[in-house]
Amino acid sequence: MKNGMIECSVCHSKLVSPSSKTISRAYDRHKNRITSKQRVLNVFLVVGDCVLVGFQPILVYMSKVDGKFNFSPISVNFLTEITKVFFAIVMLILQARHQKVGEKPLLSISTFMQAARSNALLAVPALLYAINNYLKFIMQLYFNPATVKMLSNLKVLVIALLLKVIMKRQFSVIQWEALALLLIGISVNQLRSLPEGTTALGLPVTMGAYLYTLIFVTVPSLASVYNEYALKSQYDTSIYLQNLFLYGYGAIFNFLGILGTAIFKGPSSFDILQGHSKATMLLIANNAAQGILSSFFFKYADTILKKYSSTVATIFTGIASAVLFGHTLTMNFVIGISIVFISMHQFFSPIAKAKDEQNGVLELHDVHDRQRSKDSFINMAAGANEEASHRVGHDERQPLLPS
């Protein structure tokens, strides 16, 4: 991007840099012409996310010894980010080897520097994620794994509000009602869930738990929305290159946290492998895979789908924690989960689509009748500037995902 302008990767036309509203509008139109290949990708993302997110609280709980952590949670987060950095580098090298003749080399210094400048905003969600990943461990000191998972589902409502404010995403009345149902389901499960006699930071258990819950819900929600906007606004950039920057920033922030801990607690806390076990190694692998999968959600799907898929993981977490640790599955949990599933069905029902989105469907049908085109969405930035009368011929169109 230069002087507020971007260049289309297909026809090299100069376009005005897209705003959050035009990016959101382009994505809403893109959702209505999704291909079977993209549906398969969405199913894979949801299933994979359910498994990984479902296991995460279980592994954190298994990592505790006598109700405490013998390791530094920041060290787990740092090792997770390093793992993701190595994965991004490997995938970037593999992608570069399969580039076609004439394409801009991914591994060139000029490409890297240009992408670094364009994706500098990824440092913001990286910092927020570093804070959130630490809070995940703190929350386990107050709640059992199934309850932590249910509390995290509050992020859906916060994310919806942030998407409306930041990215101008449109939601119908039915969808807002579905989100209200989601809150009701979570509230039903949370009745009498706080353990007694626990304190932190010198605060009563309810005050400390509610304070952490507020931060636990708000910080990652803001990070997710900001991450989706950053990834989609630079849609032409390789996702592995974007991930390299995101995970690199995350590793830096967590390393600074380790340094700060060493200053206050002494040099012995600088040993990032101290107190780790097989459970923490599995936790690091799970967190890394979950973070990588999330980037595909934010770039090729959306944050709401990501959070609803995480909601589905709640039932897996509840059953697993009951089997492994003897936690009781109360009637509140069963009723709460049932309401959550009803909410999810209602939110993604075709009749729940926002009015603007439905109008977009009719508009797309007219375009298809005239052009009989099977391809869609050249890239998110170019698609967001359709108001500028930018048109690309049929044979110049490219698929959304790399084949």
Image (cartoon, rainbow, N blue to C red):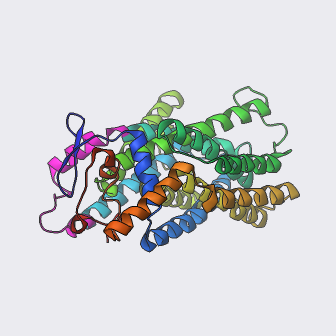
Residue 234 appearing in the image: no
314 over 265 or under it: above or below:
below
Q: Where is residue 239 in the image (x, y as percent from the top left)?
A: 34, 56
Q: Residue at x 25, y 67 (%)?
A: 394
Q: Residue at x 34, y 66 (%)?
A: 370
Q: In this view, does 212 lie to the left or right of 118?
A: right
Residue in the foreground of this view, choosing between 273 and 352: 352
Q: Magenta region: which residues?
A: 95-121
Quadrant in which the C terminus is drawn: bottom left
100 over 81 or under it: above or below:
below
Residue 33 part of the magenta-drawn span? no
Q: Where is residue 225 in the image (x, y as percent from the top left)?
A: 49, 43
Q: Which residue is drawn at 21% across and 55% down?
A: 9
Residue 98 part of the magenta-drawn span? yes
Residue in the foreground of this view, choosing between 101 and 193: 101
Q: Is residue 199 left or right of residue 19?
A: right
Q: In which quarter of the image is residue 20?
A: top left
Q: In this view, does 237 lie to the left or right of 80?
A: left
Q: Where is residue 182 in the image (x, y as percent from the top left)?
A: 72, 50
Q: In this view, does 277 lie to the left or right of 328?
A: left
Q: Residue at x 28, y 60 (%)?
A: 92
Residue in the foreground of this view, choosing between 402 and 114: 402
Residue 91 appearing in the image: yes
